[in-house]
Image (cartoon, rainbow, N blue to C red):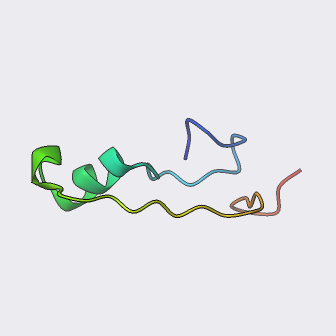
Amino acid sequence: DIDFGTYPFVTSSNTVTAGVCTGLGVAPQRIGKVIGISKAYCTRVGSGP
């Protein structure tokens, strides 16, 4: 995510719930339940510093 990562080694997609709504074209009010998923370690797009 460009807001939470180490630029320029980030994905261009939003990785929060609102990003799913934007990507699918679904209104946030239509989302009934959100289940969170997280990783225990940081990763980067590309080789990184």
Q: Is residue 26 left or right of residue 15?
A: left
Dividing the picture into quadrants, the one containing residue 11 is bottom right
Q: Is residue 3 above or below residue 48?
A: above
Residue 15 at x, y percent in the picture: 47, 52
Q: Is residue 20 left or right of residue 7?
A: left
Left or right of 7, for residue 13: left
Which x, y percent locates residue 13? 45, 53
x and y, in percent, of residue 2 in the image: 56, 41
Q: Nearer the viewer, residue 37 or 11?
A: 37
Instruction: Tell me what residue is drawn at x 82 percent, y 63 percent.
Output: 47
Please tell me which residue is depicted at 73% across the width and 58% down the height of the picture: 44
* Residue at x 46%, y 59% (from the top left corner): 36
Spot occupied by residue 38 in the image (x, y as percentages of width and height): 59, 61
Q: With 8 as the anchor, is 23 left or right in this view? A: left
Q: Quadrant of residue 23?
A: bottom left
Q: Is residue 6 above or below residue 42?
A: above
Residue lying at the far right of the rendered structure: 49
Q: For the point 17% across and 58% down, which residue is it?
A: 32
User: For residue 18, what is the image quadrant?
Assistant: top left
